[in-house]
Image (spheres, rainbow, N blue to C red):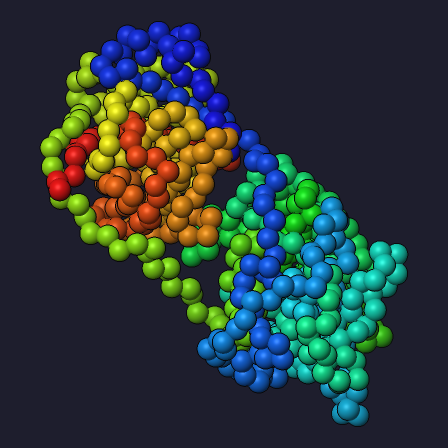
Amino acid sequence: MKKVWIGCGIVLVVGFLCLVAGVGGLAVIGWLSEPAGESGLSTPAAVIPTLTPGAGVASPVPTLSQATATPFVATPAQPVAAFTPAITPLADKVPYRAVVQIVAETETEGGNLRPVWSGSGTIVDPRGFILTNAHVALPEPGSGEQVDALEILVTEAEDQPPVPKYFAEVVQADPQLDLAVLRITTDLDGNPVDALHLDLPYARLGDSSKLHLGEPIVILGYPGIGGNTITLTSGEVSGFTAEKPYGRRAFIKTSAAIAGGNSGGMAVNAAGELVAIPTQLGSGSDNSEVVDCRYLADTNGDGVIDEDDDCVPTGGFINALRPINLAKPLIAAALRGEVAIGSTETPTPAPLPVAVTPWPTGKVLLQDDFSDPDSGWPTSSSEDSEVGYRNGQYRIDVKSANWETWAYAGEDFDDVIVEVDITKVSGDNTSDFGVLCRYQDKDHAYQFAIGADGYYQIFRWEPDDEKMLLGDGEWLSSDAIREGNATNHLRAECVGDTLALYVNGTLIGAVRDTAYTHGDIALAVGTYDHGGTDVRFDNLVVYAPAH
């Protein structure tokens, strides 16, 4: 994100107030978030150790009908070797050749295969690994449906129907996320394929954490409506939806109208990177009801147009997008040769990357309960934010959306432990608040942030960007955070190369980082889609750690 100064020395009124504030040279600064630049490129085959030649999967895969009756099937990974793909990933702005159509088929009494539904998928590895939705590859549990084969039709030309080429099997599936990874196994005659020589065109993986509101999104797939060639739908990122335990970007909302057969297909950013997967599991919207959905084409190929076909939605927000970052662990597991099908278990929180214990506190470096309105913290008001003393507390009220305001103390500390009580009085629960340490300027600091929706993160500020240091670039959730308009006690430790975040006495995040070794401390509040977040700070104490 790009941070823009609005504080001392930039806006004259605020600068005057900061001068009057006196003690410590306190200041108020804010930033307006803007889209970041294009993300770096990565592909699973290039960065993840993968299958040894001829290794196949770790164990036989159950049939698709059996898989739905098995709550969880998992096998350990086999020894693997590095793999360098024979071809590079597609660099096209619209990498349509990586899109496939997936036809789920059932066996008739005569031994023939009959299509029951179809969906889309994206080739993510040249050896025939395909990312799609779980509901495209597996029958719905308890539905009585059976899938005996998954036929893969590849895209050879943008103006021609996809070409039937292969059969595939499921190697990873998570119905909770509605994501699955398939592996091509045979040609249409049942002959095993040589995965190392398939050399299929495949998509580059992007970073969904770098998507911002208003960025263009292109959806590619085979909706089965309006013709049988690949279809492109364009739109933009219109918002994000949280879902525990998947973070604040569990769904990406988009303005693109997505027909059913696009489920499991490709959503790419302006650089042509795969950043999301269209899914019908959840709409990501408060109003997901379909106003009307009409059956206009025989999409499952049974010769009848009925409710078993994909319909054309004529109202309501139909589909949302699952971020690619949520799919990357499934892709990595598939490439390692692991098999896990039908898991409905909630993921357990990832272990802390470093083991820490609370540092004993030493000398008090700074302390303020904000009962004295002349203790030196700034007071200012603008159309974007208001800061100052209020009823024995320090108040930061951020009025604008996509804005952050912070107040810093004009000190230069090395190792510190910062403790403070933070009360959210009003505003959107996805707004965040917390403290900074080792603040040097608007592009160099560490930020400890929590939200009233139970999410948290530790950031390292960099020029024109903020890097999330915990997890895989997503907000994490913790039951230790009191949600809504409540008070949380926050403790941030910046000691040596260790950054540790405690909330209400519970350690929820820790990481090692050596970018910044000294700097100021500050109080901070930020907003996203909505402004109007009022937060109060009290009982601030900054300690030196006892060594």
Q: Is residue 177 visible?
A: no
The residue drawn where x is 38% and y is 51% is 477
Residue 543: percent from left, percent from top: 16, 34
Query: Residue visible at 51% across and 52% down?
Result: 250
Residue occupying image coordinates x 56% and y 48%: 208
Where residue 299 sits: x, y (%)? 79, 67
* Res. 259 image quadrant: bottom right
Q: Nearer the viewer, residue 542 or 341?
A: 542
| Quadrant in the rendering for residue 153 | bottom right
Report if residue 254 is visible in the image: yes
Q: Name the residue nearer the viewer: 292 or 120.
A: 120
Q: Quadrant of the C terminus?
A: top left
Q: From the viewer's perspective, is residue 497 above or below residue 244?
A: above
Question: From the viewer's perspective, is residue 409 above or below residue 200?
Answer: above
| Residue 283 vs residue 334, the one in the foreground | 334
* 265 on left or right of 143: right
Q: Position of residue 391 (x, y in %)?
A: 22, 22
Q: Position of residue 261 (x, y in %)?
A: 73, 62
Outermost residue, bottom side = 110
Residue 144 falls in image quadrant: bottom right
Q: Taking 378 as reference, is 252 left or right?
A: right
Q: Is residue 534 shown above or below 6?
A: below
